[in-house]
Image (spheres, grey):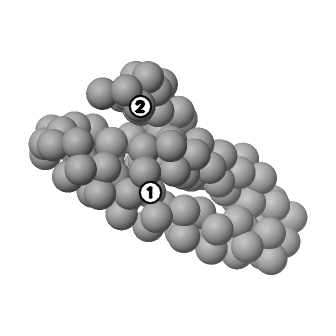
Amino acid sequence: MLKSFRITAILEGISYLLLFFVGMPLKYLLGHTQTNMAVGYAHGLLFILYVILAVAVCYDRAWGLKRFAILFVAALLPFGTFYAEKKYLRGQEEH
C-alpha cells in the first residue's frame, strides 16, 4: 500500500503543477478551457485518491494525526507532495 501511495503522491504533484503551469495559463491567457478541465478532473481524482491512501497508510502504520496532517498539507502546496514523498515516505518500506 505504501508503494501505491508514493506513486499517487508523485502523480498528484505532477497533476497539480500541470494545472498551475499549463492548464491555468492556457485558460486565462488563451481562453482554452478544455485542457484546464481535463487536467483539473485528473488532479481532483488524484487528490482524492491521495487523501484516501494517506488515511489508510497512516492508520496501517500507526503514524498518527500529526503525520497525516503533514501529508495532507503537502497536497495543498505546489511541490509539497514531492517533499513529503522524499522526507516521509521514501525508505519506509521496511518499517
Which residue is more in the foreground, 86 or 1?
1
Disc 1 crowd, CA 10 A, few/some/many (<14, 14-19, 20+):
many
Residue 95 percent across, percent down from the top left? 30, 27
Q: Residue at x 65, y 46 (%)?
A: 14
Between the residue at mark 2 and the residue at mark 1, the CA separation in whole angstroms equals 18 Å
Which residue is more in the foreground, 56 or 75?
56
Q: Secondary structure at mark 2?
A: loop
Q: Secondary structure at mark 1?
A: helix
Residue 28 makes an appearance in the image = no
Against 1, residue 30 (above or below) is below
Which residue is more in the foreground, 29 or 56?
56
Against 18, residue 43 (above or below) is below
Q: Residue at x 44, y 57 (%)?
A: 50
Quadrant housing residue 53: bottom left
Closer to the observer: label 2 or label 1?
2
Against 4, residue 85 (above or below) is above
Picture mark count: 2
Residue 40 percent across, percent down from the top left? 63, 68
Q: Residue at x 62, y 73 (%)?
A: 41
Q: Residue at x 18, y 39 (%)?
A: 63
Q: Are marks 2 and 1 in contact (CB under 8 Å)?
A: no
Position of residue 60 in the picture relative to residue 64 (left or right): right
Give the label on residue 50, or none: 1
Q: Amino acid at mark 1?
A: Tyr
Q: Earlier in the sequence, mark 2 or mark 1?
A: 1
What residue is pinned by disc 2? 93
Position of residue 24 in the picture relative to residue 93 (left or right): right
Q: Amino acid at mark 2?
A: Glu
Residue 85 makes an appearance in the image = yes
Give the label on residue 67, or none: none
Disc 2 crowd, CA 10 A, few/some/many (<14, 14-19, 20+):
few
Against 31, residue 53 (above or below) is above
